[in-house]
Image: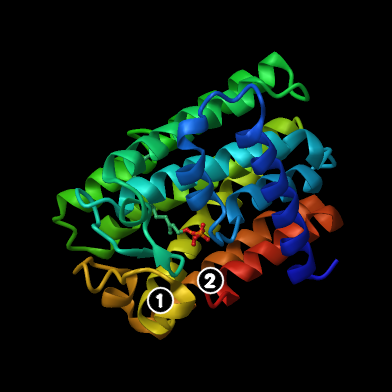
Amino acid sequence: MLRQEYLSEKGKIIENRMRELIEAPHCSYKGIFESAAYSLFSGGKRLRPILVLAVTEALGGNPEDALDAACALEMIHTSSLIHDDMPCMDNDDFRRGKPTLHRAFPEWQALLTGDFFLTFAFECITACPRLTAEQKVALVQVIAEKSGANGMIGGQLLDLSGGITTVEQLEELHHLKTGALLEATIEAGAIVAKASSQELTILRSFAKDIGLAFQIIDDVLDVTASDAKHGKSSDSANEKLTYVAFLGVEGSKKCAEDLVQRALRAIRPLGEKAVQLTEIAHFIVDRSF
Ligand code: GRG
């Protein structure tokens, strides 16, 4: 299947399932539904959940088994974007071309919506009937770890504390803030498909490289894409140090391409079944939004 077709077909499956999950009769968070739907269905690329499904497929697993874990990862990502945009952090007015959640709703509701996604994500995993108890524990463990102080939260702490002066420090920051959750998505697919330890090693190496490449391209798009396409306030407006400041636009693109090429070499042993994973890796550097 062509790349765009695959991305949009999987994106739709994920959106439908997320809607079912937050609208389910047993879900008693009705007071927060409007703000949750505003941020969850506002045009995200769905890269993280699509990666979960693609990894499961690449290992010969059933993507339907991975669907709720995939949705959970998109919810954690959404939670992090909501909190990142808030006045006490990046203080952004726009996300995906729309007012940020705390601009569209009261600030307290935005904070609670972010909290809701962070907790509800874990409920979606533990309640999923298609996963074994062992798989649920492994998923909760890896997602909590990669979102936590040694992952995304740690990266955000580094970012907000300032003091980044070298490209090595920036790489560490990007690895934690952005790469760690992408690593969790790859590991989630591997857990669902019951990957061997050899497959896990291959996929971890792939995840690390595409995670950094993804953030480097995000830095590039921050200066090259139109506001309409990128849909958010730029990091340069927030005076954040980015890859472009160290390597320039072309140097940053080259660095991201090299990382993706290395990622693709790593997954070669997975063979034909990894075709969509390969396409997603290309998308990470080719994308314009
Ligand atoms: C909620 C566990 C938790 C932590 C909060 C606020 C925070 C700690 C971390 C911020 C993390 C963050 C916003 C990293 C940026 C990652 C990034 C490049 C986001 C953009 O991803 P895309 O392009 O977004 O996939 P779309 O809009 O397509 O979903």
Q: Position of residue 11 (x, y in %)?
A: 70, 56
Q: Position of residue 230 (x, y in %)?
A: 45, 73
Q: Which element is circle 1 on?
A: helix
The residue under the point 34% across, 58% down is 171
Q: Is residue 173 left or right of residue 204?
A: left
The residue under the point 27% across, 45% down is 107
Label annotation for residue 220: 1
From the viewer's side, name the closer residue of 70 and 100: 100
Label annotation for residue 258: 2
Q: Please state which amino acid type lies under the numbered disc 2.
A: Asp
From the viewer's side, name the closer residue of 1 and 89: 89
**Gap between marks 1 and 2, in whole Å?**
15 Å
Of pointers 1 and 2, the one earlier in the residue sequence: 1
Q: Quadrant of residue 189?
A: top right
Q: Please state which amino acid type lies under the numbered disc 1.
A: Val
Q: Which element is circle 2 on?
A: helix
